[in-house]
Image: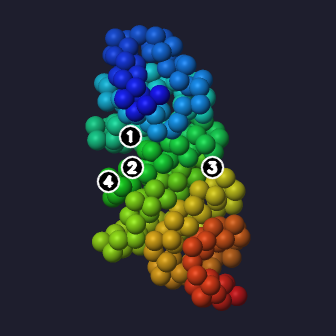
């Protein structure tokens, strides 16, 4: 399958959904989910599906989520990404629900990268306000998804100086999560800190030094991931603060 074929398939499925024929839409998609289809092609399919009318599209996405195949989560994420402009909070809410339903790291990461990641890049302040409570969600995958989305923002920012204020906001946003105990969530939050550290090393060094001096109940893995891209001098500065 190439990109043109993936886009065509997505349009055909979207047409079935628009006609209210959910079973035909699912059947049309099934061979692609059963095959080892690259995520890039699944994203093309999902993007076409996501352009449809929201209510009927969401009914289809709810059905699709029951499949549980690996490729399902990329399609769900890409479809919801297309809804961010039309129904921002609704798309985030559905992404959270699918993350909980998926109950596995690859579902969380596929949705977090596509929905939350795109939301942070496109609507920074709205995303910060909409997800503040997610940091304390009882579900570990929801908490992990915060880190996954911020990783995407940091990667897209490329460390450009014009994003310094937002990067600083994200360090502060993540501060209540630094002492996360659940390892699945630690890995996602650490991923965000690692990528922020890659592109904003000076601020990461300063912030991590403050955190380890102030907190004592953090996971060693969190700090290891957060310091991945920092140089020896920067790491030494942080570990001195911890001693």
What is the spatial separation of the Cα atoms under label 2 and label 1, in whole angstroms? 7 Å
What is the spatial separation of the Cα atoms under label 1 and label 3, in whole angstroms? 22 Å
For marks 4 and 3, the one nearer the N-term is 4
Foreground: disc 4 or disc 1? 1
What is the spatial separation of the Cα atoms under label 4 and label 2, in whole angstroms? 8 Å
Mark 3 sits on what residue?
Answer: 140
Foreground: disc 4 or disc 3? 4
Foreground: disc 4 or disc 2? 2
Tell me the tag on residue 123: 4
Q: Position of residue 194 (x, y in %)?
A: 56, 67
Mark 1 sits on what residue?
Answer: 81
Q: Alpha-carbon neighbours of circle 4 within 10 Å: few (<14), some, or many (≥20)?
A: some
For marks 2 and 1, the one nearer the N-term is 1
Foreground: disc 1 or disc 3? 1
Q: Quadrant of residue 157?
A: bottom left
- Residue at 48% across / 48% down in the picture? 113
Question: In this view, which residue lies farthest toward the front?
Answer: 2
Which type of secondary structure does the marked residue at label 4 adopt?
loop
Mark 2 sits on what residue?
Answer: 118
Q: Alpha-carbon neighbours of circle 1 within 10 Å: few (<14), some, or many (≥20)?
A: many
For marks 4 and 1, the one nearer the N-term is 1
- Mark 2 and mark 1 residues within 8 Å of each other at the beta carbon: yes
């Amino acid at each position: 399958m190439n990109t043109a074929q993936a886009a065509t398939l997505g349009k055909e499925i979207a047409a079935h959904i628009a006609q209210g024929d959910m079973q035909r839409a699912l059947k049309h998609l099934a061979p692609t989910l059963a095959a080892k289809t690259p995520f890039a092609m699944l994203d093309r399919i999902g993007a076409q599906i996501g352009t449809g009318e929201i209510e009927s599209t969401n009914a289809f996405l709810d059905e699709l989520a029951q499949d549980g195949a690996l490729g399902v989560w990329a399609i769900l994420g890409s479809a919801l990404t297309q809804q961010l402009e039309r129904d921002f909070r609704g798309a985030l809410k559905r992404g959270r629900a699918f993350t909980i339903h998926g109950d596995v790291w690859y579902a969380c990461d596929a949705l977090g990268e596509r929905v939350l990641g795109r939301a942070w890049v496109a609507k920074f302040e709205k995303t910060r306000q909409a997800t503040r409570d997610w940091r304390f969600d009882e579900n570990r995958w929801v908490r992990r998804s915060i880190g996954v989305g911020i990783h995407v923002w940091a990667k897209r920012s490329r460390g450009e100086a014009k994003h310094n204020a937002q990067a600083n906001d994200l360090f502060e946003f993540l501060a209540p999560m630094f002492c996360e105990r659940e390892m699945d969530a630690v890995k996602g939050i650490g991923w965000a800190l690692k990528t922020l550290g890659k592109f904003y090393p000076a601020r990461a060094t300063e912030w991590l030094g403050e955190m380890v001096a102030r907190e004592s109940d953090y996971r060693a893995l969190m700090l290891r991931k957060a310091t991945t891209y920092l140089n020896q001098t920067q790491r030494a500065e942080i570990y001195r603060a911890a001693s």
